[in-house]
Amino acid sequence: MKLLVATGNQGKAREIRRMLGDLPYQIVTLADLDNPPEVEETGSTFLENAMIKAAAYSEFSGMLTLADDSGLVVDALDGAPGVYSARFAPTDDERIEKLLGMLEEVPDEKRTARFVCAMALSNPTGEMNFRLGTVEGVIIREKRGDGGFGYDPVFFVPEAGKTMSEMTAEEKNEISHRARAFAEIKEIL
């Protein structure tokens, strides 16, 4: 059975493929589809955006579709970048540079943040399931580690004692926001 993972982000697709490894699905991504539509994320929450994408791509493809919306929520920035995490700046490096610039005067103890992931699973008849996952951390002042993507190099997870970029794929898949949401969606799958 095919499962469409509605993403063009190859880092995210790799993570989800690893987490899906033991399930009997043939994983398809947007890159495998002919002319998939651009689905605008017009929701004001991660969950709304995940549901919009899951429904639209399931209807387009006729496949069971998993979509997520995730991002970084920084307390000192009133929740920014939030649903705009991927559009905060053009590249990962520019997003991190902008974030660190905005937090430059914020003391270390007030740099709390969390990664949030909303996952929605839609079938072509419109039935929808969803789950949320979070991981708490703090934004450090300099990048550390070479793994991961996005804000991972500056997101320090106290329970792990390292940034998301310093974790192995296995470590990250144990505690990440995406892994936590996916663990619940996996039960539905």
Image: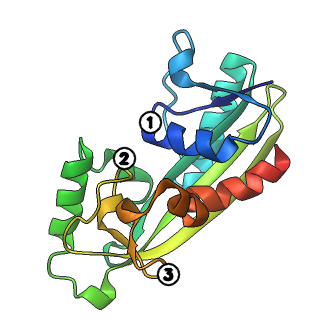
Answer whether residue 47 is visible to the viewer in this image: yes
The residue located at (84%, 48%) in the rendering is 188
Amino acid at dot 3: Glu
Say left or right for 134 vs 80: right
Which residue matches tag 1? 9
**Residue 74, horizontal then vertical, whole percent:** 37, 71
Q: Could you give the CA–CA distance between mark 2 and mark 1, rounded to whole angstroms?
A: 10 Å
Q: Secondary structure at mark 3?
A: loop
**Residue 69, horizontal then vertical, whole percent:** 54, 48
In front of the other: 23 or 98:
23
**Residue 174, horizontal then vertical, whole percent:** 60, 64
Q: Earlier in the sequence, mark 3 or mark 1?
A: 1
In front of the other: 109 or 54:
109
The residue located at (75%, 18%) in the rendering is 62
Q: Earlier in the sequence, mark 2 or mark 1?
A: 1
In front of the other: 46 or 169:
169
Amino acid at dot 1: Asn
Q: Secondary structure at mark 2?
A: helix
Quadrant of the drawing holding the C terminus: top right
Which residue matches tag 2? 86
Q: Could you give the CA–CA distance between mark 2 and mark 3, rounded to whole angstroms?
A: 25 Å
Which residue matches tag 3? 159
